[in-house]
Amino acid sequence: MSRRTAAAGPLAALAAAVALTACTAGPGNPSVTPSAPQTSASAPAPPATTPGETLLLTDFGADTVTFLDPAHRRTLGSVKVGTAPYGVAVDARGTAWVATAEGVAAVDTAARRRTALIPYTTDTGPVTTGEYRGGGMGIALSPDGTRAYVGVNVPGGDGVLEIVDTRNAEVVATVPVGRRPFDVDVSRDGRQVYVTGHDSFDVTVVDPRTLAARRIEVAPYGTEGGLGSWLKPHYTAVRPTDGALLLPFEGERLAVVDPTTGHVRIERMTADTHQHGVTVAADGTLYAVGTGPADPARDEGPSLTVRTPAGTERVIPLDGPHESAALSADGRTAYVSGGFTRDGYWNGLSVVDTRTGAVTRVPAGRRPLGIAVLPAATAPPSPATAPPSPGAPRPSR
């Protein structure tokens, strides 16, 4: 679209009023590789959720994580973890590691209790709430679960990757990274950590053994506008087949990054909506969350893009902004959190049948952002044995 290469003007002012971080247009004309045409999927029938799964949601609008049985649309309870929890990662033993404004919380998901709160060694200022709050954002685990990597936002400055020894519950190293580290990911072999710097247009590649770091600029539309630009990276998915990093932009361009060489290739996308969360299936199918239009006069509404490894896309409409996505163990269900980092969020998630495109909204949590599927062996009791939910939230209007 021409607006993506136009100079900032009245449209930029409109965008600034509604964007995640006031994202305005910037220049840049990278080569674009065409993909297959878009098809849209309607949702006339109730979706089939994957039986027996339990979800863990971070309540960015509170200080808790919420357990949810999506098949029965039942909240199973919540646990206090710390102010404004953002990202979450769950290890094979069922311990959830949660990035909050105060520190990294450890939660025993079987017992449903917090077992530790590990303070950051980085000074992030007063503990606050809201989208620009300091503290942990993205978080990921090493393959063996002995390290947690958390991207720490330092308001007004560059971010920091803090490395937590999960056995001793302490921060053992820090590495400077880009501004507002929305997301943290780890290579399949654990030898590289990838930190997505939203406000610095980059991914920082960190060697967790030596702490050496390399910056890769990821800016398919250029960097004009700086902190006020719309067109910045948000979340990254690591493609299982080759380790490439996948970052969607505006439902128009997919940045495919080789983390070894730093080469960035651009492929065409079709959803035409501002995009945030991503996840990827074992076969390389990408799921990208569209939060809604940057320009309501031109763009499409919220959606979930399902993109095959061949580049064919299916765009499933969603009702209202969403933030993050997770897949069921069998890949038949996508869970999309309704929290969103700006206004327009709602207290729940959308459950999407990935085969039919059917969508059901399920009320849960308070502004849920992060979402994780718990390992079956460590999930809390089923509704038949679980205690009554202490005040399940009402649907958002």
Image (tube, rainbow, N blue to C red):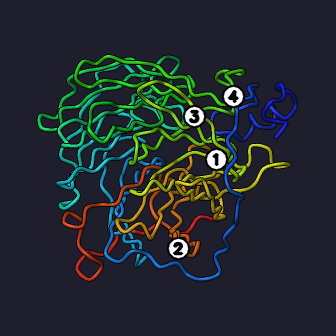
Seen in the picture, residue 132 relative to 311 is either above or below; the reply is: above
Q: Which residue is mark 1?
A: 343
Real-space CA distance between mark 4 and mark 3, rounded to the nearest whole angstrom: 10 Å
Q: Earlier in the sequence, mark 3 or mark 1?
A: 3
Q: Nearer the viewer, mark 3 or mark 1?
A: 3
Spatial CA span between label 3 and label 1: 19 Å
Mark 4 surroundings: few (<14), some (14-19) or many (≥20) residues within 10 A: many
Classify 387 as above or below 374: below
Q: Amino acid at mark 2?
A: Arg
**Is residue 120 toward the left or the right of residue 144 in the image?**
right
Which mark is nearer the camera, 2 or 3? Answer: 2
Q: Residue at x 63, y 65 (%)?
A: 316
Mark 3 crowdedness (10 Å alpha carbons): few <14, some 14-19, many ≥20: many
Residue 215 image point, x, y percent: 46, 19
Residue for badge 2: 355
- Whether residues under marks 3 and 1 lie with C-beta atoms below 8 angstroms apart, the answer is no
Judging depth in this view, the residue of 33 and 220 nearest the camera is: 33
Query: Looking at the picture, does residue 133 appear above or below residue 301?
Result: above
Instruction: Look at mark 4 in the image and give the residue it sits on.
Output: 229
- Identify the residue position indicated by label 3 in the image: 233
Q: Nearer the viewer, mark 2 or mark 1?
A: 2
For label 4, the SS is: loop
